[in-house]
Image (cartoon, rainbow, N blue to C red):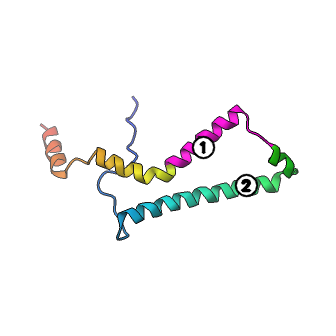
Amino acid sequence: MSLPPLPRAARGERPFFLPDADVERLLNMVVALTGEVCRLEDRLDRLERTSADPATLAGWAPDAEASAERAERRAAVIDRVFRILEADAERVLNPPEPMDQVMRRLAGAGE
């Protein structure tokens, strides 16, 4: 038996801590991008420290497999950066069930 996929967004309203929700969304996206940049800098540093020939790195071109892997990584980065907007959109499209309805449904499930 397979379980249904988990929603990408938590149910209910997102708690905002800054006065403007849009500013907070932008801050969350900047934080996600900062994490991506740090990860890329670490990978680049590792390559530069372990590569014996910088000209080899400069002249390298990706093959079809490498290009496909890069495209997958780019898509994953975009998903992580824009996750905040997707989560908000999901909450709008699939609003949470009001608690009183949940309680009535649960109370009726024991009958």
| Mark 2 crowd level (few <14, some 14–19, many ≥20, 10 Å Cα) | few
**For residue 25, side relative to residue 93 (left or right):** right
Q: Distance between the residues labelled 1 and 2?
A: 15 Å
Residue assigned mark 2: 44
Q: Are marks 1 and 2 in contact (CB under 8 Å)?
A: no
Considering the numbered disc 1 on the image, is that residue within a helix, a strand or a loop?
Answer: helix
Q: Which amino acid does label 2 sit on?
A: Leu
- Residue 62 counted in the magenta span: yes
Quadrant of residue 107 within the rendered picture: top left
The N terminus sits in image quarter: top left
- Residue 85: x %, y % from top left: 41, 52
Q: Which amino acid does label 1 sit on?
A: Arg
Residue assigned mark 1: 73
**For residue 86, side relative to residue 68 (left or right):** left
- Residue 78: x %, y % from top left: 52, 48
- Residue 42: x %, y % from top left: 69, 57
Residue in view at x 19 percent, y 46 percent: 102
Residue in view at x 68 percent, y 58 percent: 41
Q: What stretch is highlighted in magenta?
A: 60-79
The C terminus sits in image quarter: top left
| Mark 1 crowd level (few <14, some 14–19, many ≥20, 10 Å Cα) | few
**For residue 75, side relative to residue 19 (left or right):** right
